[in-house]
Image (cartoon, rainbow, N blue to C red):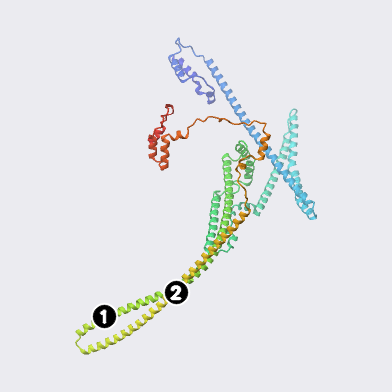
């Protein structure tokens, strides 16, 4: 039994040796449990009456049918994918053709416009004098020269290629006709290939020559410095002179103010230069072409400009076209270049914005500086006038202070003399005491006599000094008394002059008031002379006018509509009903006392009951809960 089951197992599970494609095609609805049950049954044996013998030919046919169906489905999927790819490609090409047609129309219109402007300019300048005609001929000569060179170049390069192409097409048709009768000769094909290779070599030489001329022209343009000037325009947005010349030439009486304004101009320029430098540093060393060659960058830029942002799916379209134009570059490189180009344009826009902001702030600062300088000059003129008045007052004060200093010096001298007299008196007292002590203690008469003589001489000198000090003190007191008398007279004179000036000003004010009263009286008399005198007539004022009476007479036949009852009934409360509510009266009393916003008012109003209890359907618990929370 085991010998019979073993080949059955290998044949049933022989699909393990199939390839991956055949396994994908062999799709059944069997589950793992069914396979395990079938294996167990095959192990038990096929000789039992329960099971039927396996039909291998039928199973192989089923497997072949499944494989065929899987291959058919795979081919259908491939066809579907190919059709979808072709449909997508045709859709992209159709959208590209639409964009190209619009761009072609735009370029044609621009060319026609430029040609029309050129012809109009040449026509206007060609109808003038002989000089104008000479200028026109000089302008037309390069154009004719370029056209002739273009014809020569076309005859030397393009027309041989077209002739070779037509010759090859003609030979191809002849070869197709000859193949039906006799095989082609290899010698003929060798000649044709030799001719094609020679034309290719000529075209390569022409392309190399054109590329060399292109590089030479590009070097000439670079030597002129056009690109450098265009790239450095953004760098020179903030000029080197940080302070305007017209501001430096303005005269200002305050040097510190001028220095502060110059410092403001310099700080403004430094701030915008730092901002411009920070914006330039964001480019991170990128050149004008963002790391690509000039031709590739120009082609990239022109391709992106053909697809405006308002076009649906414009980024996918120009990325597809860029991948076609640059097959040697990956999509990541194109995306990086696009990001670098956007960053460069954003940086240039920021540089222009910074330049505009600098010009605006510089103009505002210039205007404010001019206004400030004008105010400073006006203030300086006022200060000069005030300084003149102050100098006059200072002269008066200096004279008075000199007199006060002299008076103080005299007082100090008096105090010093009095102190000297008191000191001398004290010394005299001490000398007297000392003499008494010496007289009591001295034993020798000769020494006493000498001492007496000495003290007598000293006393004489002291008396002389005291006499002179007394005389000087008397003179100083007399001089100070005279000076005080003169100062008093001067002060009294100043008070009288001040009182006289005040009386004069009061008299002028009274005279001015009197003139105003006389002017008002004259004006009132004039008003009374021209006043309209009319008797009051309230009946005429409140009565109908003649026009109204005429209008009423015309409309006498029409019935007048009068409203005898109100348009609608009002269902509301009267003022007495509202005031009868105790809550309203309590709120008015609290409001009059200024307590309506306090917690006490909320407590009182929450306790007061209405005059009539509310209906059950209108009762609300929100106010109570809010009061409790408060």
Q: Which percent across, then down, holds residue 497?
A: 49, 70
Q: Which percent across, then down, holds residue 112?
A: 73, 43
Q: Residues within 10 Å of mark 1 (few under 14, many from 20)?
A: few
Query: Could you tell whether 615 is left or right of 322 in the image?
Result: left
Q: Are marks 1 and 2 in contact (CB under 8 Å)?
A: no
**49 vs 80, nearest the viewer:** 80
**22 vs 615, nearest the viewer:** 615
Give the label on residue 489, or none: 2
**Location of residue 176 by image quarter:** top right
Residue under pointer 1: 429
> Outermost residue, top direction?
49
Q: Secondary structure at mark 1?
A: helix
Which image quadrant: the N terminus?
Answer: top left
> Is residue 198 visible to us here?
no
Name the residue at 32% across, 79% down. 421
> Is residue 278 visible to us here?
yes
Q: Earlier in the sequence, mark 1 or mark 2?
A: 1
The Cα–Cα distance between marks 1 and 2, rounded to whole angstroms, is 45 Å
430 over 187 or under it: above or below: below
Q: Secondary structure at mark 2?
A: helix
Q: Which percent across, then down, holds residue 364?
A: 57, 54
């Amino acid at each position: 039994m085991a010998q019979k089951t073993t080949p059955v197992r290998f044949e049933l599970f022989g699909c393990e040796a199939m390839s991956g494609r055949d396994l994908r095609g062999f799709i059944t609805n069997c589950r793992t449990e069914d396979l395990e049950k079938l294996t167990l049954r095959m192990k038990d044996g096929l000789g039992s009456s329960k099971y039927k013998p396996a039909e291998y030919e039928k199973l192989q046919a089923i497997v072949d049918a499944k494989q065929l169906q899987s291959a058919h489905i795979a081919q259908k999927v491939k066809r579907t994918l190919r059709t979808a790819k072709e449909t997508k490609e045709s859709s992209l090409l159709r959208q590209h053709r639409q964009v190209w047609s619009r761009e072609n129309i735009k370029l044609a219109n621009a060319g026609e416009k430029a040609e029309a402007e050129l012809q109009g300019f040449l026509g206007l300048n060609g109808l003038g004098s002989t000089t104008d005609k000479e200028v026109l001929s000089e302008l037309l000569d390069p154009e004719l020269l370029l056209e002739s060179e273009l014809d020569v170049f076309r005859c030397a390069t393009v027309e041989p290629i077209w002739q070779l192409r037509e010759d090859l097409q003609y030979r191809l048709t002849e070869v197709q006709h000859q193949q039906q009768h006799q095989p082609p000769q290899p010698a003929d094909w060798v000649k044709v290939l030799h001719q094609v290779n020679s034309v290719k070599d000529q075209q390569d030489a022409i392309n190399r020559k054109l590329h060399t001329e292109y590089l030479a022209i590009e070097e000439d343009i670079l030597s002129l410095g056009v690109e450098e000037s265009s790239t450095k325009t953004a760098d020179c947005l903030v000029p080197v002179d940080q302070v305007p010349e017209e501001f430096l030439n303005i005269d200002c009486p305050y040097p510190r103010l001028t220095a502060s304004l110059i410092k403001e101009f310099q700080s403004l320029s430094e701030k915008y230069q730092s901002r411009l430098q920070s914006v330039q540093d964001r480019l991170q060393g990128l050149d004008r072409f963002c790391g690509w060659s000039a031709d590739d960058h120009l082609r990239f830029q022109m391709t992106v400009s053909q697809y405006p942002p308002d076009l649906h799916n414009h980024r996918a379209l120009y990325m597809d076209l860029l991948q076609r134009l640059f097959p040697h570059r990956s999509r990541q490189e194109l995306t990086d270049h696009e990001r670098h180009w956007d960053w460069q344009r954003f940086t240039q826009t920021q540089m222009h914005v910074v330049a505009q902001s600098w010009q605006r702030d510089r103009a505002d600062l210039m205007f404010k500086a001019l206004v400030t300088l004008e105010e400073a000059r006006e203030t300086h003129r006022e200060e000069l006038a005030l300084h003149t008045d102050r100098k006059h007052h200072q002269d008066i004060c200096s004279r008075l202070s000199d007199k006060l200093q002299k008076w103080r010096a005299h007082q100090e001298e008096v105090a010093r003399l009095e102190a000297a007299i008191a000191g001398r008196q004290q010394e005299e007292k001490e000398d007297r005491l000392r003499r008494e002590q010496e007289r009591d203690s001295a034993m020798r008469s000769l020494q006493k006599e000498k001492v007496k003589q000495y003290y007598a001489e000293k006393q004489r000198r002291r008396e002389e000094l005291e006499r002179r000090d007394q005389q000087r003190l008397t003179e100083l007191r007399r001089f100070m008394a005279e000076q005080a008398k003169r100062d008093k007279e001067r002060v009294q004179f100043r008070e009288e002059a001040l009182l006289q000036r005040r009386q004069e000003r009061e008299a002028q004010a009274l005279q001015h008031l009197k003139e105003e009263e006389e002017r008002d009286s004259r004006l009132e008399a004039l008003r009374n002379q021209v006043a309209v005198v009319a008797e009051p007539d309230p009946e005429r004022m409140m009565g109908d006018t003649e026009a109204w009476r005429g209008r009423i007479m015309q409309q006498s036949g029409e019935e007048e509509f009068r409203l005898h009852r109100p348009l609608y009934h009002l269902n509301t409360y009267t003022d007495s009903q509202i005031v009868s509510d105790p809550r309203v009266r309590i709120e008015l009393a609290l409001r009059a006392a200024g307590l309506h916003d306090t917690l006490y008012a909320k407590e009182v109003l929450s306790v007061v009951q209405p005059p009539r209890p509310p209906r059950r359907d209108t009762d609300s618990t929100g106010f109570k809960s809010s009061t409790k929370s408060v």
